[in-house]
Every structure is written in structure tokens, then in C-alpha cells.
Image (spheres, rainbow, N blue to C red):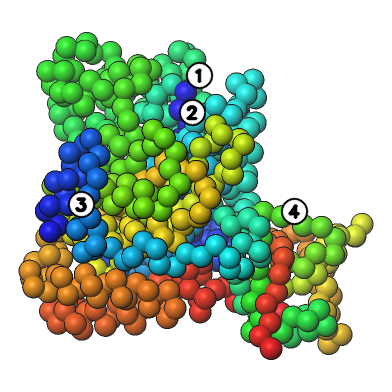
Amino acid sequence: MFGLCDCDSFFASCERVFRPELYGKPVVVLSNNDGCIVAMTREAKQIGLKRGMPLFQIKDIIEKYDVAVFSSNFALYGDISSRVMQILAEETGDIDIYSIDEAFFSLDRFNPENMREGLLQVRNKIFKGIGIPVSIGVAPTRTLAKVASHYAKRYPGYKGVCIIDTEEKRKKALELLPVRDVWGIGRKFGKRLDYFGITTAADFVDRSESWIRNEFHKSGVQTWKELKGIPCKESEELSEKQSICTSRSFEKMVCEWEQLVESTANFASACAGKLRRQHTVCQTITVFVLSNRFREDLEQYYNSRQITMNVPTNSTMEIVNTAIIALRQIFRKGIMYKKCGVVLSDISSDKAYQQDIFDTKDRLKLSRLTKAIDSINNKNGTDTIHLAIQNVSDKGQNIRHEHRSPCYTTNINDVLIVKV
Amino acid sequence: MGLELLNIADSKDGIMMSEESVKAGFPSPAEGFSDNTIDLNHELIHHRATTFCTRVSGDSMIDAYIHDGDYLIVDRSLEPHDGDMAVCFIDGEFTLKYIEVTDKGIWLRPANPNYPKIHVDPESNFMIWGIVTYSIHKR
């Protein structure tokens, strides 16, 4: 069985942690440059807002319903994500971070008799301790766990935890699920599925394996098997470009800094390769490390650190360097590490940036600069530095983030003010 | 250079990167570590995931030695008890007070005679955001 923990309206929920008056109110978060909606709360969906809507088109709705609007604040989201993952790792042991707001986890520690109660407790710990609501799905495969979390999120009756543990539940879940919502095939094959009259996940599963192989190739067959309850996908294969993750468990536990650096560098560089192959750039890099949960005699440790860069990149040097800076911040001596990994997120097309801002000569200069800036950022805050880079690159346009919240958790000048 | 790194990492058997690439690109691995320093993060933060840093504005807790501009270490995971100092959210604002739990409900008690005790209306939008575990004051 696999568990999936998925944060609800993650970016918007992060904003609510420090603005509790926004609970129950519509909140939207805008893309880089305040262009369009990238995330929103249920209340925002209910008044007709949708992902991808440009800000200028929704000005009226925002005014009418008093919608809270935020620019993306990846420094904040990354830090909150790391906190959620830490609690999840403490409570469940082995976790596999899939994106900034989702992670698979092992169910070994949970007693099948009262798994639901155990998972509700995890959910409560995350909500109370951090303020982020999560949905938890449990099922025999990762794809089905995602389906389960989909139900946990949409139907209040589940109280945030949905477990698909019988054939009956699995069948019913697939009958009610639009095939477009299935992980791994929905977006990719939407039109072809329509063409064949496949509307629910159950329709898809009812087809024969050979037919699926003909029409949807290997990845289609994998999804088909997963939906039938046969695990065959690694979490990395499920990615739909929202994030790129490379991680691996070490055969032998690792405790030396040099060894961890080496693995992290390899993972980071593999991620950078993937980025370039799909012609994208990323702006946020997360590194995580994990101790061996099966060795209860050893000190247990999980930590992750995310760094958001001022300019999106797909340069191996820059991504590797940044990953190592992140690793340095979380490395602790005396821990026997079992696993580490690198996650790239905040991914966008490389066309907008590479051609406008960089040329080949500037790139090296910029990558050095970025490194220096990162260390300054920790002390002085992101905004001014961001502008400085824009000035240096000369051709750069000013990036708008008019509605950005303070970096409550990553900048001492931005911490929450408590009136006394 | 970038390409070279990519090729090495892509050959899935995990070949080590050459010394040269490491030296060219990375900060010295030995920097910044020391066995014998006191780490205040470690000492003051018992639960990293749920601990937040906040700053004080105002003087209603002055008799509890909480001054304007002080930093507070706040742990959200702790259960509130009578007498705890807590960051509360009430009437659309964050405030720092002692919490008093009585038969007649919850009260927020300042530590300054110039300020009144606040009774928490059970109907109101009130939450205990976190419990203060340390305060940091610059001398």
C-alpha cells in the first residue's frame, strides 16, 4: 500500500497561515510577474475563478467578492513545504517527495486495524503545527493513492483521509472518476480519450491491455496496470513537469559530507539535464536528506532546504551549486544518511528567459552573481537584490510582484509582528 | 563544463564526478562546519517544523519582560495550558497575552496594569496561533 499526502490549495494555504482572517475567504496566488492565477482556494473556485485566468480579466470579481490576491512567494512556500515534509517524515518514516506540496509515504508504521485514525492524527499534527490542511490518499498503487487523495480532497465526508483498500472501493472510485483527472494520462491523452469515448477511469481500465498498448503505448499500460491495483510506477515517472525529482536510497548508509555532496551533485545535474531536455527552466531547488528509519538505534533526522533563485535557470553549474548550498545548510555531522534527493520546482518554459535576458557571456557572470546574491539575500531580503539583477542584465523587464507577502519564515526582517 | 557534468550524471550507474569539476564549481566542502559551537537553533528550537519566529510590537506584556522589538520563539504544536504565554489571533489581529482558562471561558491577560483583560467571546473568530517558548531581548 502507498500513502500520498497532498496539501490543499498549497500556496494559498501558506498565505493563510500568517493571515488567519483569510480562512473561509477566497484567496488566489498569481504566477511570476503577477500574470495569471496559479493557485487558489476552494472559495475562489466557487465564485468562478480558474487556474490560468489573467489578473486583468478578473479585476471585477476580485473587487466584488473581496478576493485576497498574492504574488507568488516561493521562499515562503518552500519553507512551509519543508516543514510539512518534516512532520510527515517524523510520523511515517520513509517519504518520497513528489512535488513542493505532495509526498508519498510508507504505511509500515500504521496498524491496518486503525490506519484511518492514525492518518487523521498525522493530518491534525500538520494542520495544528503548521496550519496547512492536507488530504491523504491510501491505495495499493501510487496512481490509485492519487485517486484516493482526489476523493479525500473533494468530499468533506472523508475528513481528508480516503483509503481504497478493497476491490469494491477501487471499482467504485474508478467509475466516478473522470478519466481526465487520472494522473499520467489525463492531460497527455485528453483528446484521444474523448475520441474513443472513454470518459471515466473505469472505461479506461475496461479496455484490453493490448488495445491500450497500441493506442497509449508504454506509459498508458503502466497507468492501466496501476489503476487495476498492480504497482509499476516509480514516483519520478508520475511527474507531469510541475516538478523534477531525482533521489535514491544509498546501499550503504552515508555519513560523510563529501559523499553526500557527490550524490547531491549527481542528482542535481541529472535534474538539470531533464530540465533542458524538456526546454524548461526552474527557479526553486529543494534538497532533502533522510536517515535510516529502520535503525531505531541511530539518531533519526529528516531535513530539507529550498532555495529560490532570482532568475530561472537550467544551467547545470548553477543548479548543482545551489543544491550544494542548500545541502550545506541541512547537513549534520553524526547522522547516518540513508537517502537524499533534489527537487526542482517553479518550472517554466525556457523561451521567455534564455533569449531575452541571457547571452552566452552573461550567463557565467550571472551564475556567479546569483550565488553571491543568495548569501546576501539571507540577510537583507529578496526584493532589492532582485532589482539589482534586473539592472545588471540591462535588457531585463521588471518582474512584478506587487502583492507579495513577507517572507515570514526565511527573513528576520519579515517575521510576523505580534501586537502586545 | 555544464555539458560534461550532465553526461556524467546521466549515465545511471552513478559514476563519481571528477575532482576537477568539483573544484571548479563548488564551495569548499570543509567550510562552515565545526564540532564545538553552541547552536542556538538547536538549543532554542525543540521542534523545527512547527516553530516560528515573531517580533513584538507594543508594551502590554512589559511586566513579563517582553519589550517592543523583542523576538519570540513560538511553537505551534504545543497544547495551550492555563498560564501559558501565547500568540493569539483575535478580532483580525495577532496579539500576545497570557491565556487564562476558567469556568467562565477563556481570558487573555496582559502583563501591564494599563491594559484590560480580554474575555474571549466563544462566537468570535479566535485562535491560539502558538505558544511562546522563548523571548529574545537585545540589551
Q: Marks 1 and 4, Cα distance to the nearest angstrom? A: 34 Å
Query: Disc 2 on helix, strand or loop?
Result: strand
Judging by the rendered image, the residue that carries numbered circle 2 is A138
Chain identifier of the residue bearing label 4 in the image: B
Whether tag 2 and tag 4 are in contact, CB under 8 A, the answer is no
Query: Disc 1 on helix, strand or loop?
Result: loop
Pointer 4 local density, CA inside 10 Å: few below 14, some 14–19, many at least 20? few
Q: Position of residue B133 (x, y in %)?
A: 72, 65
User: Are both tags, 2 and 3, on one chain?
Assistant: no
Task: Identify which residue is drawn at 15% across, 66% down.
Answer: A353
Judging by the rendered image, the residue that carries numbered circle 4 is B79
Relative to A181, is B107 on the left or the right?
Answer: right
Judging by the rendered image, the residue that carries numbered circle 3 is B18
| Label 1 vs label 3, nearer the camera | 3
User: Are both tags, 1 and 3, on one chain?
Assistant: no
Residue type at mark 1: give it.
Asp
Which corner quadrant holds the C terminus of chain A?
A: bottom right
User: Are both tags, 1 and 4, on one chain?
Assistant: no
Task: Judge whether residue A21 can be spotted in this image.
Answer: no
Q: Quadrant of residue B2?
A: bottom left
Q: Earlier in the sequence, mark 4 or mark 3?
A: 3
Q: Marks 2 and 4, Cα distance to the nearest angstrom? A: 29 Å
Residue type at mark 4: give it.
Glu
Query: Disc 4 on helix, strand or loop?
Result: loop
| A291 to A45, vertically: above or below | above
Chain identifier of the residue bearing label 2 in the image: A
| Label 4 vs label 3, nearer the camera | 3
Mark sitting on residue A165: 1
Whether tag 1 and tag 2 are in contact, CB under 8 A, the answer is yes
